[in-house]
Image: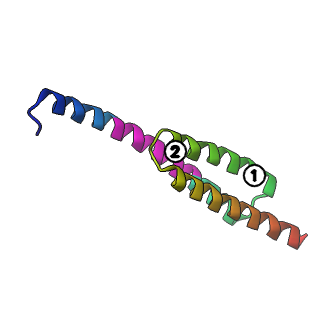
Amino acid sequence: MANHKSALKRMRQSEKRRLRNRQVVSRMRSSIKKFRQAAEEGKNPEMLADMLQQVSVIIDKAASKGVIHRNNASRKISRLTRLCNQVGSRESAQA
């Protein structure tokens, strides 16, 4: 336990930030899981593209707030985009 006034303040600040960051990460992970589940179920590509746009915004916000690194955010978006394109190409190949 900290004894100095400044250290106590830093503890309070870091606890607030931890809780705030946890919410952001939780929202991001949930949206990614929903997107992946929709892709596995083979939803139509237009709907997946809309979902991808929403998920990308959530991931970018997490990166801009410093919760995750910008390269990590870029990698996540890239992989989800590739998944969306694969589902779209499967749909067009079946038609």
Asked if the magenta segment contains residue 92, the reply would be no
Q: Which residues are magenta?
A: 17-31
The answer to which image quadrant residue 42 occupies is: bottom right
How would you rate the neighbour count of disc 1 (Cα within 10 Å): few for under 14, some for 14-19, many for 20 or more?
Answer: some
The answer to which image quadrant residue 2 occupies is: top left
Q: Residue type at mark 1: give it.
A: Ala
> In the image as oriented, which residue stretches furthest toward the top?
5
In the picture, the disc for residue 63 is 2
Foreground of the two, 7 or 43: 7
> In the image as oriented, which residue stretches furthest toward the right?
95
Q: Is residue 41 above or below residue 10?
A: below
Q: Position of residue 88 (x, y in %)?
A: 80, 63
Q: In percent of the image, x 52 and y 40: which residue is there? A: 64
In the picture, the disc for residue 88 is none
The first of marks 1 and 2 along the sequence is 1
Q: Secondary structure at mark 2?
A: helix
Foreground of the two, 18 or 48: 18
Image position of 64 (left or right of 80): left
Magenta span: predominant SS is: helix
Q: In percent of the image, x 69 and y 64: which residue is there? A: 83
Q: Position of residue 46 (x, y in %)?
A: 81, 52
Q: Secondary structure at mark 1?
A: helix
In the picture, the disc for residue 49 is 1
